[in-house]
Structures are given as C-alpha cells and as structure tokens.
C-alpha cells in the first residue's frame, strides 16, 4: 500500500502533489506519477523516485489547480514507466490512481476485451478505470454513480482517486481496505493516504470509512456516501500536531 495525494482548489496543484508524494515516500514505492487537468490532461509517470519524476517534468508549467499524484508498489505488472500510475480509460477521459489489488481483475478484463477494450498496461488498475467507463456508458449515468456501481462488482482492496477530463471541478475518491483521508481547507480539499501531505495546509480532516466514496468539489464542498448509496454526515476531526 503506497501513496496517494490529490488536490482541488485555487492553488497551483503541481507543487502540492510533489511535496505530498515526498511526504509519503516513507511508505516505500517503486515508481511515481501525476496527472494535472487544465484544458486537457497532462500525465507524467516514471519508475524510480519522486525526484526522477520531477526530472521528467523538468521546467514544464501547468497552471492547474486540480490534480492527482501516486507512488506505486507494483503488484500487477513490472515496476516500469508504462505500468506506473495514473492510468487513463480507453476514451482518455478518466485518469485514476490506485493503491491496492483488484482480485477479480482477470475476469473483468476478459469481459471488457470482448466489448472492444484494449489495454496499454499490465495493471489491475487500468481494468478498474475501464470498468468504470463501461458502466457509465452502459447505464448512462453520472461518473460518481458509475464508480459506485463498478466498485460493487470489484473484489479486493483499494484506495482510488479519479480525475475526469470533462469535469475540472470534481475529484472522486473511494476506499476499501486501504486508508484515505480528506483535508478540508477553505475553498480547497486535499485527499491522501494519510494526513502527512495535508497537515501543513489544514488541521481539519475527515477519514473515509470502509466502503465509502467521496465526491469532492472545487468550491470546497463534498459529499460522502457508502457503496450501498447511503449518504453519510462526515465527522471532521481536528489534528493536533
Ligand atoms: N495493484 C496496482 C498496481 O500494481 C497498485 C499497486 C499499489 O498499491 O501501489 O499497479
């Protein structure tokens, strides 16, 4: 279980993500990656250290205030650049980061392959994002509802965050068997595997509970529902570091 960090708000996302990934390095990892959204998705990923990822990004600037970052500990597919996260869906509209294992990925992959999906990586994670895309298409529903339906078909453990190219005002996060915390700022929200990337920005956090997902909006609002589709009233905890 490695690292996840996400940001939505008014600040420049890239430095927050890189700093956050460095704070999560202690968890161990073999590759790192980021996706930023600003008139299209910019994705950079690299086997090795977060500093190797920074070297690949070089002097690029993004002016993006929404993004996701990941450190991977490979379980499905070699630790190389191609298998590093984020992964994108077949249409290119959705980007996902994931810690954990989708145990029934092989049967889902087989079904999706029959429906015309092709896969660029060896990961279970790419299977999950394509399942979500397929459910959304088939059910003609919102992305968050598609995430909920898809996660109900999945066996395994996950902390995921999804970025949607067509909705720069929203992140979706979910967890089962892998921790996830939201940092509630004023007009900004952070999401991470633990509070270490968040603590310098806000002390107010909400821990997602097992089998819950969050829809996180740019204006700082968020809703949390169970995978059974029951809305929760989140408890904000004040961290005292
Ligand atoms: N199972 C995923 C992969 O191999 C995620 C591994 C992780 O937890 O970093 O890419």
Image (tube, rainbow, N blue to C red):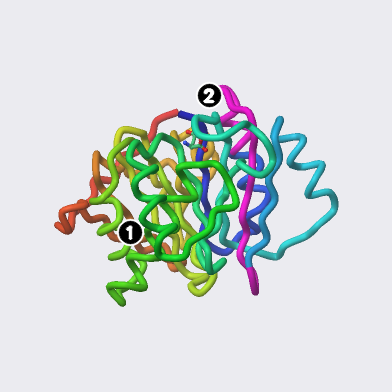
Q: CA distance from mark 2 to mark 1?
A: 27 Å
Horizontal and vertical percent for residue 168?
A: 52, 70
Q: How many marks?
A: 2
| Residue 177 found in image quarter | top left
Horizontal and vertical percent for residue 38?
A: 64, 69
Residue in view at x 78 percent, y 60 percent = 61
Some atom of ligand 1 lies within 8 Å of the CB belonging to the residue at label 1: no
Residue that numbered label 1 is attached to: 147
Question: Does the magenta run of residues contain 33?
Answer: yes
Q: In front: 195, or 37? A: 37
- In the image, residue 199 sits, relative to residue 241, either above or below, namely below
Marks 2, 1: nearer the viewer: 1
Q: Where, quadrant-wise, is the N terminus in this rendering? A: top left
Residue in view at x 84 percent, y 49 percent = 58
Residue in view at x 33 percent, y 65 percent = 135
Horizontal and vertical percent for residue 92?
A: 57, 66
Give, as a single range, the part of the protein colored magenta.
21-40
Q: Secondary structure at mark 2?
A: helix
Q: Is residue 67 left or right of residue 214?
A: right
Residue that numbered label 2 is attached to: 27
Q: In front: 211, or 65? A: 211
Residue in view at x 63 percent, y 49 percent = 34
């Amino acid at each position: 279980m490695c690292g996840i960090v996400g940001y939505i708000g008014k600040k420049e996302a890239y430095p927050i993500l890189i700093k956050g990934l460095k704070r999560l390095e202690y968890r161990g990892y073999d590759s790192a990656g980021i996706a930023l959204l600003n008139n299209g998705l910019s994705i950079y990923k690299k086997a090795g250290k977060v500093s190797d990822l920074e070297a690949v990004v070089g002097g690029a600037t993004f002016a993006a205030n929404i993004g996701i970052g990941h450190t991977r500990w490979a379980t499905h597919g070699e630790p190389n650049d191609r298998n590093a996260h984020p992964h994108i869906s077949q249409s290119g509209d959705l980007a996902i980061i994931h810690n954990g294992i989708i145990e029934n990925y092989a049967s889902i992959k087989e079904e999706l392959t029959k429906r015309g999906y092709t896969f660029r990586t060896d990961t279970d994670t790419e299977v999950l994002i394509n399942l979500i895309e397929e459910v959304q298409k088939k059910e003609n529903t919102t992305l968050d509802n598609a995430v909920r339906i898809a996660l109900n078909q999945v066996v395994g453990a996950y902390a995921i965050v999804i970025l949607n190219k067509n909705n720069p005002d929203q992140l979706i996060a979910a967890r089962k068997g892998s921790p996830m915390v939201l940092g509630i700022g004023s007009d900004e929200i952070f999401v991470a595997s633990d509070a270490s990337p968040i603590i310098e920005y806000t002390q107010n956090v909400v821990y997602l509970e097992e089998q819950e997902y969050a829809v996180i909006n740019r204006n700082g609002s968020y809703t949390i529902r169970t995978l059974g589709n029951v809305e929760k009233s989140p408890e904000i905890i004040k961290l005292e570091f």
